[in-house]
Amino acid sequence: MAVIEALLSIIQGPNLWNALPDLMVFVAPLWVAVLFGVLVGWVWRPTWANSALNNFTIPATNYPSFDSLKSQLPSCFFSVSDNGSVEDCSSGSGSDSRLSKLDGENKSFVGEGDLKHLGKLVAEKDGGPAWVKMMDRSTNNMSYQAWKREPETGPPQYRSRTVYEDMSPEMMRDFFWDDEFRLKWDDMLLEAETIEECPKDGTMVVKWVRKFPFFCSDREYIIGRRIWESGKTYFCVTKGVQYPSIPRRTKPRRVDLYYSSWSIRAVESRKGDGQMNACEVLLFHHEDMGIPWEVAKLGVRQGMWGAVKKIDRGLRWYQKEIESGTPLTHCAYMAHIYSKVSTKRMKYLENASNDSQEIETSEPTTANDEKPSGKNVPKLLVVGGAIALACTIDRGLLTKAVIFGVARRFAKMGRRL
């Protein structure tokens, strides 16, 4: 009340012009508070506000947006740590203005906690549900085994073991990291861009845009990835990360839950000659596909083997390119920058928990094991409705294996009806 009375006494004075300096004393702090509130509200605006902004266009383009102003600063300045606090890290200036360098001395997007989690997955000590075997196949160049499990919360998780003949772990490591070559063999990948990288430990933040068949919209990933080496085994972590400086868009839609990590090591060839010229890859993968999980499991089971053979073809193509003298791309070169962990330290991380899980061996589930409970509902209607629902849900990644797997099952049912 005292502030209001003082303001009224100034306004009611005989000479308003002489009272202008006193008015500024009251007005200036208010404007500072308003501008500060607008700035804070913009930086931490909710998701629905982002969607509204993406759908709102302004004819005039001469005014810079706040995101364009942020791009002038080190993008890592706006990164968010695992505990939700805003991190500060320095950014080195490079010849490529697209890249800002992650400071390897500060906490990065992928840290030792991710290595610990992958190590326990490899050692089968993560305390999760038992793995159920779903596939065991091979070709002249490789052998493949796959398992799945369904946690109480979250999407189904998949584990696979692939052994590639006449392949080195280093070649395999570079192949997985080489986004530029992936654009050649993976026809689902539309764009691949490096957002940030650390020249000290090899941490990278990349953006992918993947193409989807039928009438589903494309999907966008923001992926953090890093490699460790321990005892001649490479531990490669890739996962979805939060990156506020890249705003969400209506199309392509952002994929939030994504985890795809693997271990790579040399193993003895199945030729029985005692040579360690084969490469074992243990892959652990799960993601929010944004579709009913029963439909997703159906598609994965039907399309998995085709996807595995496609990866093998791309790998052999890559091997020929490198052996013929083709220079490494920048992404593949980044795979040569990794952190070394002693075997003793790795064992400690793997044994941090006493929970151990054995792999449950069982036969692959047949289609008859997952009949819909409503027997009077035609299968064509059930599967067709599930596909339509999957393609209209507003989030998650709908992989090629799911789409074409469900499509093949759909076609088979159509022939039987």
Image (cartoon, grey):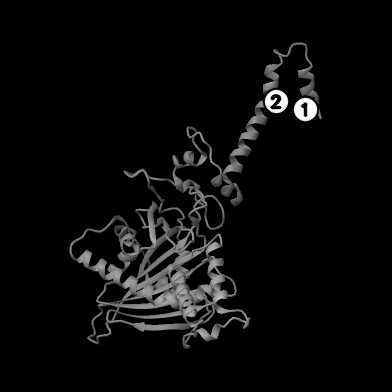
Residue drawn at point x = 44 percent, y = 39 percent? 72
Few, some or many residues within 10 Å of mark 1 (<14, 14–19, 20+): few
> Tag 2: residue type?
Phe
From the image, tell me which residue sits under label 1: 3
> Tag 1: residue type?
Val
Horizontal side of 281 relative to 293 (left or right) equals left
Viewer can see residue 231: no
From the image, tell me which residue sits under label 2: 26
Per the image, label 1 sits on a secondary structure element best described as helix
Viewer can see residue 235: yes
Residue drawn at point x = 48 percent, y = 65 percent? 398
Residue drawn at point x = 78 percent, y = 14 percent? 13
Is the residue 294 above or below the residue 190 in the image?
below
Looking at marks 2 and 1 on the same chain, the residue that comes earlier in the sequence is marked by 1
Percent position of residue 129, x then y:
54, 79
Per the image, label 2 sits on a secondary structure element best described as helix
Horizontal side of 110 relative to 328 (left or right) equals right
Percent position of residue 8, x then y:
79, 22
Q: Residue furthest top?
A: 14
- Foreground residue, 264 or 373? 373
Residue drawn at point x = 52 percent, y = 55 percent? 81
The quarter of the displayed image where residue 230 is located? bottom left
Is the residue 359 above or below the residue 219 in the image?
below
- Foreground residue, 165 or 100? 165
Q: Which mark is residue 392?
A: none
User: Which quarter of the rendered picture does the N terminus lie within?
Assistant: top right
Is the residue 250 above or below the residue 391 in the image?
above
Question: Gap between marks 2 and 1, in whole Å?
Answer: 9 Å
Percent position of residue 369, x then y:
54, 86
Percent position of residue 242, x then y:
51, 55
- Foreground residue, 375 or 370? 375
> Could you tell me if the residues under marks 2 and 1 are in contact, i.e. CB atoms within 8 Å?
yes
